[in-house]
Amino acid sequence: MKLPMFPLQSIFFPGETVPLHIFEDRYKQLIMDCREEAITFGIPVYIHDSILFGTEVQLVEIVNTYETGEMDVTCVARQVFKVLSFENQMGDKLYAGGDVQFLDNINDAEDSVKREVLGLLEALYNLMSVPFTPIEVSKFHSHVLVHKMGLSFDQEYELLQISKESERLQFIKNHLVTTITVLEEVNRTKQTIKLNGDFKNFDPLDFEDFSTN
């Protein structure tokens, strides 16, 4: 399938709201085409000097239009794709485009794994003294709070490419376990430093007790 392209150094997951500020003429044209022709476009992730994977998005609303022609728009992310080809101009359009192949999204995760990941996520938030709002297992998906789990950009990009929900949750679980372990060790170290920094009354050793007669 051929899609218009809007490359960004950003990662969006299916179901996520995508707010964009449009200021280049080529992307103004893209947004107008999306509004008038009800087409979608792709946001391929620019990473490591290449674009290989991205997410299809659909225009929801043009929120603001400025005198300069710039726009604030809201979109919603739909499907993840692999980039098969890329061209700087799509036919006679100003914007880029290319052929893509959509990745399958296999929802094969068990509720027990979801509960485990949610428990780890809550433990992480507690360690960081950040409020955690409970999420129903039936409404929890790997893409929920994905930007609020402490994943690096590279980790989010890797997660984007995983088709199976069970494997995505395992990826997140491994990350959370590692992060929690590190934070717990940091907290223990802080506590040790704090305790050792307090003034204490030490009883000096009585070397006479160690003398031999």
Image (cartoon, grey):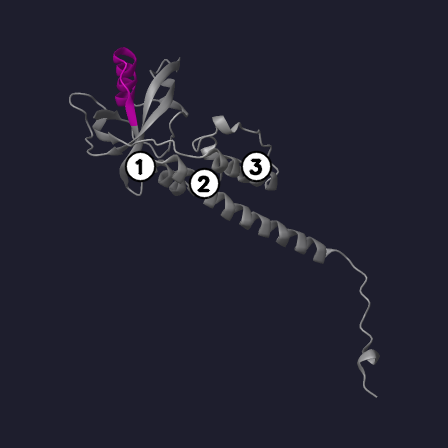
Quadrant of res 25? top left
Find residue 106 and report its horizontal and vertical position in percent.
35, 32
Question: Of residues 66 and 47, which is closer to you in this image?
Answer: 47
Q: Name the foreground residue: 88 vs 189.
A: 189
Q: Do the numbered discs 3 and 1 sit on residues whose CB atoms are within 8 Å? A: no
From the viewer's perspective, is 172 left or right of 157?
right
Q: Is residue 185 left or right of residue 170?
A: right
Q: Residue at x 62, y 49 (%)?
A: 187
**Which amino acid, by three-letter code, is at mark 3?**
Glu
Q: For label 2, count other residues whose C-alpha is less than 10 Å away and answer few (under 14), some (14-19) or many (20+).
A: many
The amino acid marked with disc number 2 is Ile
Give how far apart the Cα atoms at labels 3 and 2 are. Answer: 13 Å
Height in image: 94 above or below 81?
above
Q: Residue at x 58, y 52 (%)?
A: 185
Q: Tag 1 or tag 3, which sits nearer the N-term?
A: 1
**Which of these two is toward me, 66 or 38?**
38
Q: Provide the residue designation for mark 2.
A: 172
Q: Which residue is mark 1?
A: 46
Question: In the displayed structure, would residue 73 be above or below residue 145?
Answer: above
Do the CB atoms of the residues marked 2 and 1 lie less than 8 Å apart? no
Mark 3 / mark 2, whichever is N-terminal: 3
